[in-house]
């Protein structure tokens, strides 16, 4: 099965969002708001986009051409993710439309906790040169 | 910031979040997220692309919109938020990005109330980088 054949299942691996991982992410996105929230006594939480970024990481490792772009993102945050959580990320190719020189590939993704609880789900659309989306 | 789950009236406008991107901050994000695409990380390679230089990760710019929602809704956003956005333009090192949002509607469904915001991120030239909707539950059991 080709990398972007419709129905292909993708395993983006398991990530432990420990304090260091979350701190590095928050520093990188210059987000002081969640840092304040995480030290306010209301619990310590993983930014949902840090979870969703695992899919971008996984897609970036799929040997795409340099100029592949994400053109659309949909995502639902279904439960707050506590710092320290182990999260497993998977995906699936749901469409692959060729239009002349380009291809629009849609991937669905989801992130689940150790108990199988759904934490984040969504869709992303990639714009690729048509020859690369096979 | 609203850290607690609240049932108050949603604000008409989200707090504005403004950040300036540098090549260093883009590379910092790449290392933190694991997305090491040379289009973001390697100026000498990205310079040969049609972008003629590096561009920021779309998810980095999207994080600024998420921060605006976190500022307004705290934990409600982290556990019940939704985003549906289009990436309209790329952001580059040196760009100053402003994320903002305006309340579009409040809806009731199955006994729950949600607020929907039109959200966007623009650069210093007022070009739209990302636009779309963000939805958040205003109450949660």
Image: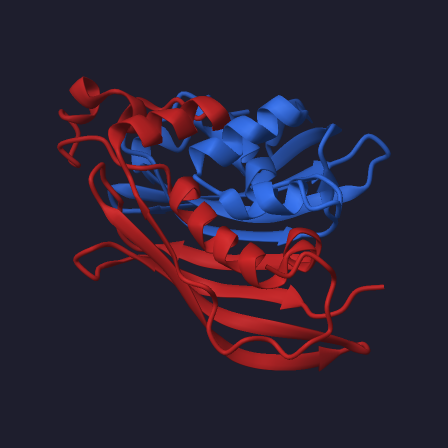
Spot occupied by residue A58 in the image (x, y as percentages of width and height): 52, 27
Image position, residue A106 (x, y; %)? 49, 45
Q: Is residue B131 visible?
A: yes
Quadrant, the C terminus of chain B: bottom right
Count of all numbered marks drawn on residues in the image = 0
The quarter of the image holding the N terminus of chain B is bottom right
Query: Which picture quadrant has residue A11?
Result: top right
Residue B128, by quadrant, is bottom left
Q: Nearer the viewer, residue B50 or A115?
A: A115
Coloring scheme used: by chain
- The residue at the point 72 percent across, 52 percent down is A78
Q: Colour of chain A?
A: blue
Where residue B4 sits: x, y (%)? 73, 59
Locate residue A39: give its quadrant.
top right
Above or below, A134 against A33 in this view is above
Chain that the image shows in red: B
Q: Residue at x 38, y 46 (%)?
A: B61
Residue ID at (46%, 46%): B63
Residues A34 and A69: in front is A34
Query: Is A104 situated left or right of B70 in this image?
Result: left
Going by the image, does B22 lie left or right of B59? left
**Image spot of residue B93 (x, y percent):** 22, 36
Q: Is residue A3 visible?
A: no
Asked if A42 appears above or below A59 in the picture, the reply is: below
In the current view of this chain or complex, which residue is farthest to the front? A40
Which sits in the foreground, A54 or A127?
A54
């Amino acid at each position: 099965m080709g990398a972007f054949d419709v129905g292909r299942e993708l395993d983006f691996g398991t990530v432990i969002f420990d304090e260091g991982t979350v701190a590095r992410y928050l520093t990188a996105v210059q987000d002081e708001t969640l840092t304040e929230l995480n030290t306010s006594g209301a619990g310590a939480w993983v930014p949902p986009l840090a979870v969703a970024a695992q899919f971008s990481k996984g897609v970036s490792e799929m040997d795409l051409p340099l100029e592949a772009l994400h053109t659309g993102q949909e995502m639902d945050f279904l439960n707050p993710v506590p710092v320290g959580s182990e999260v497993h990320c998977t995906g699936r190719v749901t469409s692959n439309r060729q239009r002349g020189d380009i291809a629009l590939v849609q991937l669905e993704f989801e992130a689940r906790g150790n108990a199988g609880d759904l934490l984040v789900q969504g869709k992303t659309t990639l714009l690729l040169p048509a020859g690369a989306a096979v | 910031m609203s850290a607690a789950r609240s049932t108050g009236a949603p604000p008409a406008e989200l707090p504005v979040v403004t950040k300036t991107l540098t090549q260093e901050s883009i590379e910092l994000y790449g290392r933190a997220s694991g997305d090491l695409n040379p289009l973001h990380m390697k100026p000498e390679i990205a310079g040969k692309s049609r972008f003629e230089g590096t561009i920021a990760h779309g998810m980095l710019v999207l994080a600024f919109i998420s921060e605006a929602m976190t500022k307004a809704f705290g934990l409600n956003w982290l556990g019940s938020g939704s985003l549906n956005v289009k990436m309209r333009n790329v952001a580059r090192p040196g760009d100053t990005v402003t994320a903002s949002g305006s309340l579009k509607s409040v809806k009731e469904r199955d006994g729950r109330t949600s607020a929907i915001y039109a959200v966007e991120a623009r650069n210093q030239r007022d070009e739209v980088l990302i636009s779309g909707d963000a939805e958040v539950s205003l109450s949660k059991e």
